[in-house]
Image (cartoon, rainbow, N blue to C red):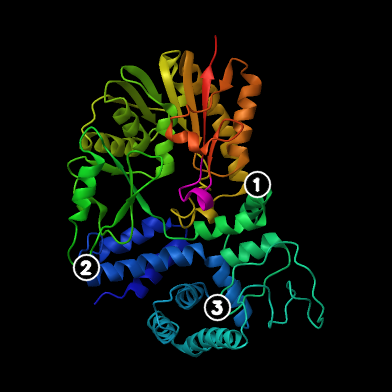
Amino acid sequence: MINPRQLAFIALREVHKGAYADVALDRVLQKVKLSDCQSYEELSDRRLLTDLVYGCTRRQRTLDALIDQLGKKKSHQQPAYLRTILHLGLYQLRYLERIPPSAAVNTTVQLAKDNGFSGLTGFVNGLLREYIRRGEGERERGGQGDKGTRGQGGQGRQGRQGDNSFSPSPHPPLSPSPHFPLQLPENPVECLGILHSFPDWIIEVWLKQFGFAETEKLCEWMNQTPVIDLRVNLLRASVEEVETALQSVVGAGLSCPYKRVSHLPQALRLIGSTGAIQNLPGFSEGWWTVQDSSAQLVSHLLDPQPNEVIIDACAAPGGKTTHIAELMGDKGTIWAGDRTTSRLRKLKENAQRLNLHSIQIYTGDSRNQPQFQNIGDRVLLDAPCSGLGTLHRHADARWRQTPESVQQLSALQKEFLAHTSTFVKTNGILVYATCTLHPAENEDVIESFLASHPNWQIEPPEVDSPAATYSTPQGWIKVLPQKQEMDGFFMVRLRKTND
């Protein structure tokens, strides 16, 4: 019998050793043959397992804070695997409302017993039940959970310990929670970082751009389960044909509701459970591919035309490359390159499935491709970046990036932009795009490039372009997830004016 909590524990052990969360989860799924499940029970187990692995990875700072405030020893003082078990229990109590508290406690105690902590089951049981007890006490008092630290004797917005006076908050109140209220520091950076489980430096970057209220909304959005968007291949099927095919998917408790996405003519958003995506109708026929809506905007901003020469400088795994081919009617030449052969193999597979023939693949660093100088009508630089706009899709990314890695990426992006700009013909187009929300990788890169390349200028999208809706006064595109309900993206269209 499959135990999703035990499997989650195994995967999380690997994550804490340094494995990527998606890789660790996939290994476990393959081992127990849940990777291609279809029955209701299998799907339910897989959903719980996935939620536990990704959720505990995302929320580890909050879960550590709970351990710090509930236990006699801080989280970093706990045995590493016991800390993982406590994370699993607290995550269920705090974030999985469909699981009864008693089930969360009992299964976590059993996890401790089954994994070498029989002597500490009383501690595990006591800590989790203390969480429940304090949460129930807060509800009886009509409290607002994490809205301040009222009732916890801490130093929060409702006044300091032993002080009944009220100090006006320097920023809006936090979203209410019915659970055990964390003791949150007055500092807004640490406050949001602990409550929503982000490193302080990311919170600082977002606060400077968006302010407190929008940053909290962005944090909440980044902690949601990501949606799946499809891009219909109009060379193989119409949107209506794909909609009809999706409506036919009913069986084994599986449904596949969807909705269209505003301003994007090829986009359909799946809602709810889908099972294995490759089992949906139209996949093997090349009717559609998976691509987030904001990523679809990039190719529309590039606006490739039939019979042009297009260079996609960092192309793998090929979502934007294949979209470019579709928008060109598969007429013309697309040079698609990347440094990684395995990722290019995925691009080739996608192109074959979608029945696209205009894509020519090359392997290599785009900073060393002199054969492309001055031949491109349009060039796409989908630059390597920190991915701060897609943290909801990569549970551990927030813990892997650092301010230092961002600065290194910014320097790399400037190099890529300087080199790939030489690929563009006079009067040609270059689109620079990232899936991050960090000015050092976006606005700063473009402003630096324009300052040293006077023969280039920003060209806003045409008014009838799907990208025009998201254009800023500066002429670039900035997609904010908490407002547009899509991955966070930055993109700008540049035109080469002369030699």
Picture quadrant where residue 134 is located: bottom right
Specify the quadrant of the image occupied by residue 409.
Answer: top right
**Left or right position of 327 against 36:** right
The amino acid sitting under disc 1 is Gln
Q: Which mark is residue 178?
A: 3
Q: Which mark is residue 253?
A: 2
Quadrant where the image shows the N terminus = bottom left
What's under tag 3, amino acid-wise? Pro
Give how far apart the Cα atoms at labels 3 and 1 are: 30 Å
In the rendering, which numbered label is found on residue 209?
1
Element on which disc 2 rests: loop
The earlier-in-sequence mark between 3 and 1 is 3
**Residue at the extreme front:** 464
Helix or strand or loop: what does disc 1 sit on? helix
Residue 287 in the image, given as x and y percentages of width and height: 22, 41
First along the sequence among labels 2 and 1:
1
What is the span of residues highlighted in magenta in the rendered image? 480-489
Secondary structure beneath label 3: loop
Amino acid type assigned to the residue bearing label 2 in the image: Gly
Residue closest to the eye, 193 or 178? 178
Q: Position of residue 368 (x, y in %)?
A: 46, 22
